[in-house]
Image: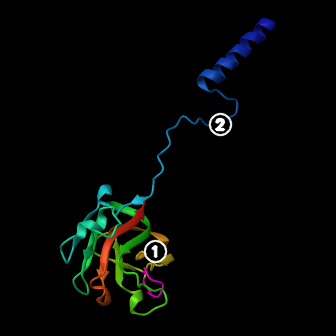
Amino acid sequence: MDYNKQIVTALIFTCASVVGCSSDSTSTTSNVPQAPTATEKNVASATNGASVSSTFAGNETFTIDGDTATTNFWVGGADGDEVNITFDQSYSISEIKLHTNNRSVSISGGAASTGFRVFISNDDVTYSEVAMYISVNAPIACASNILSNTNGTIECGLAINQDAQYIRVSVLPDFATTELYEVEVTGI
């Protein structure tokens, strides 16, 4: 009898350790490969496949080169000049940042609070405006706005992630000579 117990014990041990047998019918194995988790990145960066054009041609490539320094920039020549950035694919975007030389932006209203208009699109036909400034009423709201008079950064954390493959930054009259160093769009 002891010999039979040893054989049964050996079989159970072998089954459990070699093939993962279990008396519990609800157990699962973890040998199934898991899909990698997406990582947020600046989808408006040339290194991530973005391209750029503008209505006032010149140095628009500086807006997607990853350099937020003040030495290289695009500047619009007049009201309505635009930088148009195309991402390599559609992304779920959560944040937009504009790096500029404008240190007079204001969240309390007035002309200084609306230097740029920002629009996004997923089809390059229908664009929706992003409320980059607290005083601007636009279809796409920001959960948080940061307007820095220290370094000229205008930042919008979107209230709800938006699917987009295109972003357009349009200059308004009072800001026709504002330098745009970089456009950052965080997406996954």
Image disc number at residue 156: 1
**Residue type for callout 2:** Ser
Q: Residue at x 70, y 29 (%)?
A: 23
- Where 18 sits versus 161, above or below? above
> Is-magenta flag for residue 74?
no
> Could you say which quadrant of the image residue 130 lies in?
bottom left
**x then y, percent, for residue 87:** 31, 63
> Is residue 147 visible in this depiction of the protein?
yes
In the rendered view of the protein, which quadrant contains the N terminus? Answer: top right
Say left or right for 34 vs 58: right
- Where 25 sits versus 76, above or below? above
- Where 73 sits versus 22, above or below? below
**Label 1, label 2: how many angstroms apart (C-alpha)?**
46 Å
> Could you say which quadrant of the image residue 106 lies in?
bottom left
The part of the chain drawn in magenta is 131-138
| Residue position marked by numbered label 2 in the rendering | 27
Which secondary structure dominates the residues rendered in magenta?
loop
Which residue is the extreme one toward the bottom? 110
Say few, some or many: other residues with alpha carbon within 10 Å of mark 2 (under 14 / 14 to 19 / 20 or more): few
Say left or right for 20 vs 88: right
Q: Secondary structure at mark 2?
A: loop
**Residue type for callout 1:** Cys
- Where 140 sits versus 122, above or below? below
